[in-house]
Image: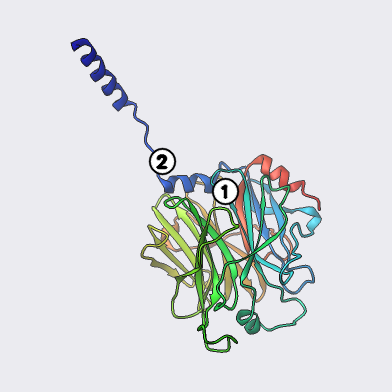
Amino acid sequence: MVKLHLFSLLCLAISSVFVTATPTPEADIEKRQTATGSAYGYVYFQGEGLSNGEQIYFAVSKSNSPVSWNVVNGGRPVLTSTLGTKGLRDPFIIRDPSGSKFYVIATDLRMFGGNQTWDQASRHGSLSLAIWESPDLKSWSAQRLVQVSPATAGMSWAPEATWDPSTQKFIVYWASNLFSASDTGHTGSTYSRIMYATTTDFKTFSTAQPWIDKGTAIIDTTVAFDSASGYYHRFSKINGLILQERSTALFGTWQTVANGVGQAQYGSVEGPLIFLSNVYSGVWHLWLDGINPQGYHPLETGNITSGVWTASTGYVLPPNPRHGTVFSISATEAANLAAVSV
């Protein structure tokens, strides 16, 4: 019995020395963001000034740098809409945490042709998101249109998603004007909030709830987690300016980091997208969609917590690059995306 007891103590001591640390949920997010990327993909739309500009396009970086790009599918849309308004804007792509598939979500809106004003579109627009999924960036599911906003909403614009490891669900968020239930014609005064719902499969969603309500119009929210600072960083367009905030939790207290990001360099901007460098530790890239002229303007920082962003140089972007997502991909995924032909 004594020998067995001593042996047990020895095993316990050895196991305590070699115990393996459990990765934090935030570290898991950071791992997926960098994804040992060998290249970048870019999903975007081209704007209402072109007859097919409100469809979904892809590009692949020419190297492991986001400076220059090759368009996919000969520069033609890869995903086109046959449902709802038959227009697609603001595409966002996210990788499933298992790594087994990608989801693309987009605004269901068509402005080409001038059949409606922006005010009309924001009061009587689509309440649904356009959604696709793919296992490899080469083959894509059929489009589906899923209603996420309540009948009291005027639209569902600029959707994005963040995986929440604490709940094991995606937090999906978008901008909606909200009206009182009695205002069935949506004629009253209103402003856009950021709504959210949760999902595990982008097929069924929880009941939408307000996430960000500033008492004034807010849109184009995007979120990234920075492991170096331990903060989520959130970028939104509010009162015509890009606001950067930070919080240790998605539904925690958010503090202002900077307001008017990119204004000094580029004037009026919207549609922020943010991504972590595949190559340089701690370097973040922020692209802002210009209003006049339209098109993305890249910035970067080596310290996201500082709120100081410097204009990037040497960029050659695809034609007519508008609001979308840049995402890290492997060499195989880059080859798959480059080979798309539809």
Quadrant that contains the N terminus: top left
Relative to 44, is 122 above or below?
Answer: below
Given the current orientation, which residue lies at the most extreme left position?
A: 2
**Residue at which label 2 appears:** 23
**Residue at which label 1 appears:** 96
Cβ atoms under marks 1 and 2 closer than 8 Å: no
Q: What type is the residue that disc 2 sits on?
A: Pro
Q: Depth check: 86 or 318 in front?
A: 86
Q: Position of residue 177 (x, y in %)?
A: 54, 78
Please give the name of the residue rendered at 75% of the width and 76% of the height, measured from the top-left corner.
Answer: 112
Alpha carbons under labels 1 and 2: distance apart: 18 Å
Q: Is residue 287 in sight in this rendering?
A: no
- How crowded pointer 2 is (Cα within 10 Å; few <14, some 14-19, many 20+) is rated as few
Given the current orientation, which residue lies at the most extreme bottom position?
A: 188
Q: Position of residue 202 (x, y in %)?
A: 59, 57
Q: Nearer the viewer, mark 1 or mark 2?
A: 1
Looking at the image, residue 27 sits to the left or right of residue 4; the answer is right
Q: Is residue 84 in sight in this rendering?
A: yes
Q: Which mark is residue 40?
A: none
Label 2: state its secondary structure.
loop
